[in-house]
Image: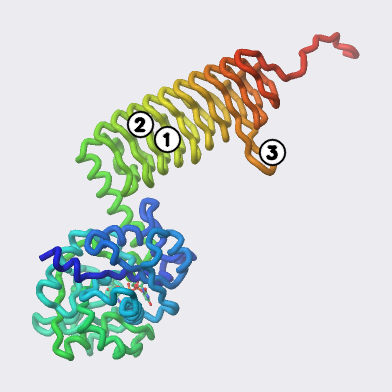
Amino acid sequence: MSALCQNRLGAVIFAAGQGTRMYSSTPKVLLTLLEKPMLGYVQDALDPLCPGRVHTLIGFGADKVRAAFPEREGRFIVQEKQLGTGHALLTAVTALDAGGGGAPEYLLVINGDTPLVETEILRDFTDKAVGGESDLAFISLSLGETGAFGLVLRRGDEVAGIVEARDFDETRHGPKGSEVNAGVYCFRIEAVRPLLPLLSAGNRSGELYITDLVELALGRGLKVWADRRGEDARLLGVNTPVELSRSEERLRARIVERHLESGVLLRNPGMLRIGPEVVLEKGADVTGPCEIYGASRIAAGVRIASHCRLVNAVLERNVEMRSFCHVEDARIGERCVVGPYARLRPGAVMDEDAHVGNFVEMKKARLGAGAKANHLAYLGDAEVGAGANIGAGTITCNYDGRKKHLTRIGEKAFIGSNASLVAPVDIGAGALIGAGSVISKDVPENKLGLARAKQLTLPKLGW
Ligand code: UD1
Ligand code: CA
């Protein structure tokens, strides 16, 4: 049944709202959990259900949302004014009707602020909604504290409607229950399309509510079904900083648990923040507090000590990373030793067995196999050959105020302490640079380059 459903199914994520309760100028769906935007999680959960047919409805900060997901271009629908979730659905259906292939038979709709949702929940829900020939289906939860959620009204056992928390009135709606609307719907478009023009903004928010469709559908004898999912925290929305923090913590704990169970050694796991796409091989050993995000990949045998922050970092087997390192968009080869207190910025590459020590910064620089920069150095726009030694305090002067220039250091060259290498400049293989030199001309292979004032010994006149 599943495959059949999928061919008839499209999906829309509602992501046009501002999220006023987050007090942020960033659109809510771009706020991150473990450094990944909320919307990315929802898209990832939907994609397997109807690949290529997941649309995202955007409005507030549309350009920013577009820019964050360039690979989704062509599958955005713009809701110019955010007149409510009912208007959001109307906008989406109108756009799908007008699109090349026309609208799908069934439309899965989900609020973009539910980042913990999982594919399996949505698959099960849509399979049942479509299999049971529901015209309008939605997921409901049972919560002790119903907060700002829409409340599901029942007459006996049957769903009678959804009323928003702000509009709830005990005298009209009866005693408040614990069943709420999760904000996940499956519509048979043919059945629901005629109801959309009937929505009205006659409520406390002055918005068109998608939830009013339930009563409208029932009034026309359509088949309405609520998929009751109890207390499932994976369906909770994120509307406030408290909710964002709680959802992020749930996700964090879930990811850490998954790695532990797969054979990664995580020490002080409560203090580890690991992004959802990070790959940690069995046998890696990480001590918290640490943050590892993005497309980082940590191979078996790697040891990472506490207080490191890694973003899109690749650490090959048996790397030893000491405390307080910052690594971003960098690759560290097998058996390298890094830190403590090293900073590898975008484009830093360490070949196998290289060492980078305390207060060394690398940017767009390659350190050849077995090369060492153990103390207080800046290597920017540089190529360092295998086995070279970079003395303490060495600086590649890569920037002339306008452009960046390259420094090349040959194999087994030895750069004395506190040398300034004024780029563009080439230091040949095996060359030796005297400590304290300011080198602005190339130094050939196996020569000694010295550029500093001669030391004088003079009488202490006038003392
Ligand atoms: C909504 C539901 C509520 C449900 C809750 C679950 C309505 C009227 N209420 O309330 O029953 O319990 O979700 O989390 O739908 N959006 C647009 N365009 C708009 C308005 C909203 O795209 O014009 C988007 C928002 O960006 C958001 C989503 O729709 O991602 C839901 O909107 P939000 O304002 O958060 O609705 P809730 O008040 O949470
Ligand atoms: Ca919400």
Q: Residues within 10 Å of mark 1 (few under 14, many from 20)?
A: many
Give the quadrant of the N terminus: bottom left
Q: Position of residue 20 (x, y in %)?
A: 43, 71
Q: Position of residue 119 (x, y in %)?
A: 22, 59
**First reached walking from the N terminus: tag 2 or tag 1:** 2
Q: Quarter of the picture for ligand 2?
A: bottom left
* Tag shown at residue 171: none
Instruction: Report helix, strand or loop for mark 2.
Output: loop
* Tag shown at residue 316: 2
Q: Position of residue 394 (x, y in %)?
A: 61, 25
Instruction: Report helix, strand or loop for mark 3.
Output: loop
Amino acid type of disc 1? Arg
Q: Which residue is mark 3?
A: 400
Does any portion of residue 181 appear in the rendered image? no
- Along the horizontal axis of the image, is 308 left or right of 395? left
Q: Which residue is mark 1?
A: 331
Nearer the observer, 129 or 140: 129
Residue 204 figure quarter: bottom left
Q: Position of residue 188 (x, y in %)?
A: 20, 78
Instruction: Residue at 61%, 16% (x, y): give it.
Output: 445
Note whether ligand 1 is within 8 Å of mark 2. Answer: no
Give the quadrant of the C terminus: top right
Q: Is residue 45 above or below residue 141?
A: above
Q: Are marks 3 and 2 in contact (CB under 8 Å)?
A: no
